[in-house]
Structures are given as structure tokens and as C-alpha cells.
Image: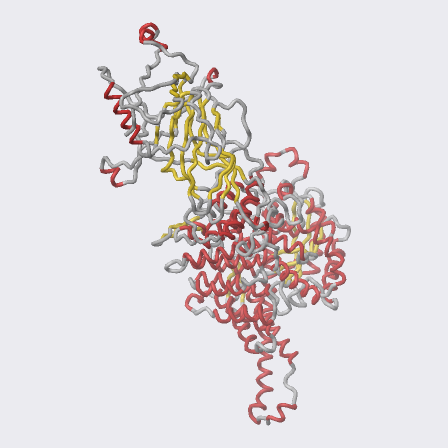
Amino acid sequence: MAQTKKSVSEFIQDAFCPMVAVLCSYDAESICRKNNLTFAELIQPFCRLPTEVSYRDPSNNLITLKNLRLEIKDFNSLPPQNTLAKKLLNDSVSSALNNGIVNNEHEISTEQYELRIRNTTPWFDAWRDCFLRISYNGDHEYLKNYLACIMVVSTSHLDPMDAFAKLVQQQNLQQQQSPAKLPKWFMTNIYKYFVLLHDVTEGEESKAVSVFGDLKQQYGAGNCHLLQINSKRAGQTSGDTDAATNMPDPWRLYVKQSSSTTQQQQESQSISRKESSMSDSLSNLTELIDQELNITTSISHPLSSFDTSSSDLTSIGTTDEGYDGSSITSASTIIHGACLTLSDHDRIHVFMNEFVTKGLLLWVETNLKTFNEQITSRRGLTKFFSMPKKLFGSSTTTAKNVPSTSSTNLTNDSMEIRRAGDLAFLFQNYEFAYNNYYAAKRDLSRDQAPTFYAGVLEMCCLSNFMQESSASKAYPAQYMDEAIDIYSLACRLPIFATRCVLMSTEILKSREAYDQAVQQFLKLSQEDSDLRGALFLEQASHCFLNYRPPYIRKYAFYMVIAGHRYLKAGQRLHALRCYTDVLSIYEKPNWSLALDHINFTLGKQSASLNHSNDAIRSFNALFAPNNRIQNAQQQINFFKEYLTVFNQLTNSQTILPELPVPVIDNSTIKILLAGQQQPQIGTQVSNCNDFDFDETRKVWSDLERTITALDRRASGTRTQINLFTSRTHNQQHPIAVANETIRVEFYVRNILQVPLLLSEVQILWKHSSNSWKRKSSVSAENVEDSKEFTNDTLTKQSDEPVECDTLTDCVVFPNDTLKIELSLRPRRPGYVTILGICYRLNILVQNISDQTTWPYGIKGKTLFHVKGTRLNSNHKERLNVMYGVDKRLELQVIPEAPLLQIEYSPMPTAMFYKTTEVDEYNNCEHCRYHTESDYAAKPEERQPKVKIIVGKLQ
């Protein structure tokens, strides 16, 4: 399990805290509305006592309460309806995705893996807190029943004492009505506390003192309190923005959780409150939570079907809305407590402390003693009436005919024991609670009352753990396992089974029993609840990381399943997070099928969320060169989905995206400065002559040596290299001439089982007037000159400085290689970088059903990646894999120069050795040739002389 902010004891105490109802008159609520709060919301931030309080148990032992918190709710509040409950739990998960992601990772290192895993899962904590907040208890327990009611009337009322009497009567009528209705009460004689609310700025202090004296005389001094608030007028804070800003706002978090649901609850439940009984409400509530836990969507498994449904491409955006659909940001701008000062805050603190210490704890102490006396006396009577049966015995036939002890009386006795245990548990008397729960467990068997039996088993475990001596005791995990099975299988109450798992797994985590925690999480991760199943599977996967040694592959397996369940629950962002976290784990052993499933899901869901870069990267990984397991039909399905997503995401892009296929063999890239454009062949694959560079390499070298040997001038000569391959020295930039053809040859390989159709193939280039080393600043005069041009765009540019030949189409067959030759001509001087090729990609299929819906395919690019020879000159280069520079793709284009072309018409079939036969000399460029005298006259216009020797090739 991931770490949580709360300790186990704090979590259990906050999950089961005393419930107190608030019943206010209209005038009291009006005073609280000046602060944009109800009275229940007003005291919410002060419900946790900052100091320790104590009381006496039935054995007169002192029980100290630490960190006691009360849950205050309005008298008219009811559990949320079905639609709202779904939205509450879904929003709690989606809105907590980015909470606590900073500095929240730890490293896990094994022999094979090095991972960075999140320490916490705030979305699980948010869902758990929301689930426990909106859940309600059943008839077999009293933990969520109101055990006290605070009556609130303001001093502005015409007759406050009469108003208090009416509130008491209203509460009594609601509690005594038959059939019973919500809210449920802990017992008949609940604790009532009376608060006289006084507005300091508008009320009369003398009237407040007088009424409060009558109130104490009527209901007792320990059961009454005079609360003074609103020490500031609203007009005072409106002009002083700094003072209003500096005042603390402790209500922000509480109002965010509750106030946004108040109006919808009141509208949807005002009619049902009057007509529904308690039993109907409880059954509806159980159905409500069950339906909430069964949130499903029609998202198919990625490996079973590759069809794109409309629901998959619809993103779920609920993080920007409140629980009622309103914007949270607009609600957060409301100022709460504008009329309250720090003195008012202190008064509320004092009120809550006196309510607990002078009233509630005394009531708890009295009732615990009463419960203990009643239980002890009933046990004595039971033993007394059972003695004759033990002494005299009875025959078997008589036992069959004589009715046994009334099951109703036995159930009532057991329920009183359960009530006493719940009251003791709520106020941290865990030893007394455990004794009562264990006694109740012995009174009834599993077959007589399975729900009641599972409830006392659950509380036996919790009360046993919460005792101070629990560290030395063995945790009865078998009790909790049995309770989970009864709740989920026998009683069909997944809400209570879920609560058991939430409590038990936290206890098991604190005792490092992660294997048992995994088993309990997996019990409730079935298909009946996708959101709950996804959360529990994710927590189970984190448990595997806490094993020694960590079970990395089991962690990854259950995270993938959790991601799939998140998809079915409509939580796409969480699904992407799960799949992304385990992607690196499956990459190392190269498990192709698992990687295909993960990459396909990541690509598809990233596309539905408009994460174009992530989607394209994931789909490109499906066509990796090392993937040899995919069959042809599977690759067709992948490619059809790829085309659909690709065209949807690239509509708004301007730069060509990179395509995964075909694969370019970078070692075969060759650059030839070919001179004049060659005539088109038409039937060949490319628009260049079918000329093999490697076959004639030795011939050209021999011819170059011959020319050098015949040139007897004293000055040295320099060889001008026109052919650049992976075997040549490419430390210098090739020098090309404007308007002369540059030929590029390379091989492509189809790694798929499906033929690929390449069309509109061109060289991808970038042209700049500056060198490749960009200057730090460019002057305003040179901005136009330093402009870069490229054809790496989806739109055609005008006045492009480079002209490219286009290969209309070619087919690359499955697992085959194909040689492609392309050419380009720079139109003006500058610096040209050959980046790769751009083309349209599609597949060739025979079946009509396999044809794509995009007949023109997708337009993209594949980049060249060249590297120099392996360096091996020093010790450092020999120890590390280092390569030299390779500049064959970075060409410097100089202005136009003379180009001599020699034509033979026809080419002779035989020639004499060392003989030249030339029919025609042509100057292909618009530059004149110069004689030897021109070199002395005009040095700036010197052009090299050309000497041609053609010999018979042996």
C-alpha cells in the first residue's frame, strides 16, 4: 500500500467519530448567513478538540480522549441521492490526480530494475474519505447514529424560550414517529444541548443575559451556552480589504465538501423525506452506494477489439466543476466569516469545549454505567433460568416440541450490548467496547443474524487493535476475513465489506502484513465495481513493492489491470498514469505482447485526451524494429487505428510528424554531387540514373591517379571529392554549386508483414544563409538574409530556395529492402542540410474490410541519422563507444560556376589507349570560360581550366 498522511489510529478515529445533529431556528440561521455559513458549517472547523479530555468508565477508570473529533451535521441533511453520490466519488478521484506530486517519489533498485515510485496515492485517500463521509450505517449498528442534538435560537427571536420548546418538540416527534424515518438516533434519551446565539453588533446584551438565565433554569446550566458572534459589521470589512484578506478562513475546505450539495439535496429530498420510512431509506441508501460502486462504461479491452468507439474519443472533464456542476473557482471566491473576529473564533472554541466536557461526556459516562448494569443483570437472569435445564435435563422429543427462548428477546439483548460497545468505541474506551462486542458475538451465531454477526466481528478487530496493549497482542485477522465474506457473499452488502477492507488493510500495513492486505484488496476487486476495483488493484500492486525483495513484475501486472479498470470507470487520466508507470518495466525484458497492449492503450487514450505527442509516440512504438510477434492482421488493425488517430491529431499541426515505417538504413546513405540534372528514366524507382556508386569506385580512383600523374606542374593538386559515403572521410562540409544536382541514395526496409505504399517521396531539407553555428545575435539588416527555409511543413511554401524531384510512388514488400535515389537542386548560395525524406504512407491490402478509411494515407517524415567512424586513437576512446563527426549531410552551396559537359554522339564502341575523341563541348552553366591570360588580368574572375583524358577501359 502507498503511504498516507494519517496514522492508522487517527484514520480509525476519524472514520468512527460521534455524530451530533444541529437544529436551528430561522432567526439563528439568518445571523449565521451574514458569514455565508450555516450554523453547522460555522462550527465545523472547531469540532476537533485541541486538548485532551477525560471521563470515567463503569469501572471508575479514567479514560483520556486524545484528538477527539465530532461530526456535526444539520438536522435536515440526508445522504446524497444516486446521481450525486456517483459524481461525488468520481470527482474525488479525478480532482486529486495532481495532489502531492512534488518530491513524492522514492527509488526501488533491484538487479534488473531501477524504478521511481510515488510514495502516496492522494486520489485513493480522497475517495476513501468521501466514501466514509457519504456512507450510512445499517440497522445492525449505531456508529453513525446521532447521539446528541444542539438546539440553536438567537436572541433576536421574539420568544426564545418558546422557540426552544418547539425545537425540542420537533426533535421528539421526528424520533418517535412510526414508521421511523431518517435521521436515525442512537437511543431514545439522546443528549440535548441548548445554544443561545447572540449577534454582538445588532442584539441587545441585556435581553441575552436575561434569556440565558431562564434557559439555564429550564434545562440546566451544564446543558446551555451563550454564544456571541459577529463582532464586526459587514460594512466594516467591505472597505478594508487588507483586514479581510489577513483573516483566516478555516471554512474553505469544509464548505467545498458540503455546501455545494446542500441545494440539490434539499430540492431532491424534500418530497421523499415525508414519504419514505427508515427501512426504505436504508435500503435505498445501500442500493445507492452499490450503484455508485458499479460505475461502468462501454470501453472494450484493447487486445480484444481495435474499433474506435465514439465514447473512447470523449474526454471526461469533471475536475473543474463542483459536485453540483457549478464551478469550484467561483465558489471559492466567496468570503466566509467576514463578520467574525479572532475573539469570535475563540468563543466558538470555548463553546465546543464546554459542550464536550460539561455536557456530552457526563451523558456518556452516565449511559455507559446504565448499559453495564442492564447487561450484567440480564446475564444473571439468563444464568438463573438456565440452571433447571442443566440440572434436570430434557428429552430430545420434548426439545423438538417445546419452543426455544424468543429470538426477539435474544436479539434485543444483543442489540443493547452492541449499543453499549458502539458508545464505548466512539469515546475511545476500547477495552470495554471489545468485551461487549465479543459477548455479542457469542450470543448469536452466523446463521441466526449474519449481518449482526459480521458487524461485531468487524468491531472486535478494530477495538482489539485500538487498545494500548494491542502491540503485544495478535491481530485477529481471521475475524475481519470472515466479516468481509459475510458482508459481500451472504448479505450482499458491499458497502460494509468495503469499509472492512479499508480499515483492515491499514492495520495490516502498520504490522507489515502486506500479503494478507493483498488478499483482502483482491476480494473486492471483482467486476461489480470498476472504480473501487481499480483503486483496490492499485493499492494491491503497491503492496507487492513492500515485499522483501520487491515483486516488481507483480506490481506491473496489477497496475495494468488497474489501468484497464480505470478506463471502464471513465477515469482516463488515471488509466494513462497506471500504464505509463509500468511501461519501463516491460521494456527491459522486451515482452512484445504486453508492450503492444500498453502502447496501444496509451496511444488510443492519449488521442482521446488530445495529447497528440504522447499518442503519436505510443503508436510509433507499436511498429518498433525488434517487434517480431505481431501477425499481418494485427498489424493491419494497428495501422488502421494509427491512421485514424494520426489524421485527427495532425489537422492542427504545421510540422511534419515522424513516421515509424519504413526504416532507413543509415549506413547506406550516399551523397553524389552529380552536376547537371539527369534525364528522367520513368520506369525506374527513382528519378536518377541507375548508377551504382560502389561498383565504379575503383575505376574512378584509377582515373584520378592517371590525371594526377600526367599533371607535371610544380604546384600541388587537391582532389575534389564528389561522392560521400560511410567509407569516406566526412570531416569537411561538401561543397555544392547552385543549380547543380545533388543525388542521394539510400535503402529502406519494411519491418512489417504488410506491403507499404510510399508516394510523393522527396528529400527533406533545410536552407539557411548563415552557417550551421548560429550567431548569438542577428542585426536588423541581416534578418531577411538569415531566414531559414525548409520543406518540413504540411503546407507548400512559395519561392523555395531548393528544388526537389518527387518520386510518385513505390511499394516496399514485407520484410524486404528497396533502394531509393532522389535528387535536389539548391537555387541560391547558402547552407543546405539534408534532414531525411518526407512522403505519404499507406498499406496495400487485398480484402476490402482491411482497407483504411484514409485512401491518401498520412504524410510524414523519416530523418537521417549518420555518424562517423569509430574512434580508437586513445585510451578514453577505446574504453567508450565514441564516433567521429560526419558532415556529409551538411552542404555548403557556392554561387554558380562553369560546368563542362562532354557528349559523344554516338559513344564509340572501341577506343585507342591514351586517345581523346570528343564530338562536342558544352558549357552547361551561364559562366564563361577563361584563358590563361585571364588569370593574370582578372584574379577575381579566375575559373579552373579543365583537362579531359578519356582512355579505353581495360
In the picture provided, is 663 more to the left or to the right than 850? left
In the picture provided, is 524 more to the left or to the right than 925? right
Task: Looking at the picture, tell me which residue is in the foreground, 404 or 469.
Answer: 404
| Quarter of the image with the C terminus in it | top left
Res 486 → quadrant: bottom right
Residue lying farthest right?
A: 158
Q: Residue at x 63, y 47 (%)?
A: 322
Task: Looking at the picture, tell me which residue is in the foreground, 72 or 474.
Answer: 474
Q: How did the renderer colour the structure? A: secondary structure
Task: Looking at the picture, tell me which residue is in the foreground, 415 or 33.
Answer: 415
How many numbered circles are shown? 0
Is 415 above or below relative to 315? below
Q: Position of residue 464 (x, y in %)?
A: 49, 68
Q: Position of residue 334 (x, y in %)?
A: 64, 41
Q: Position of residue 600 (x, y in %)?
A: 51, 50
Is 206 above or below relative to 862? below
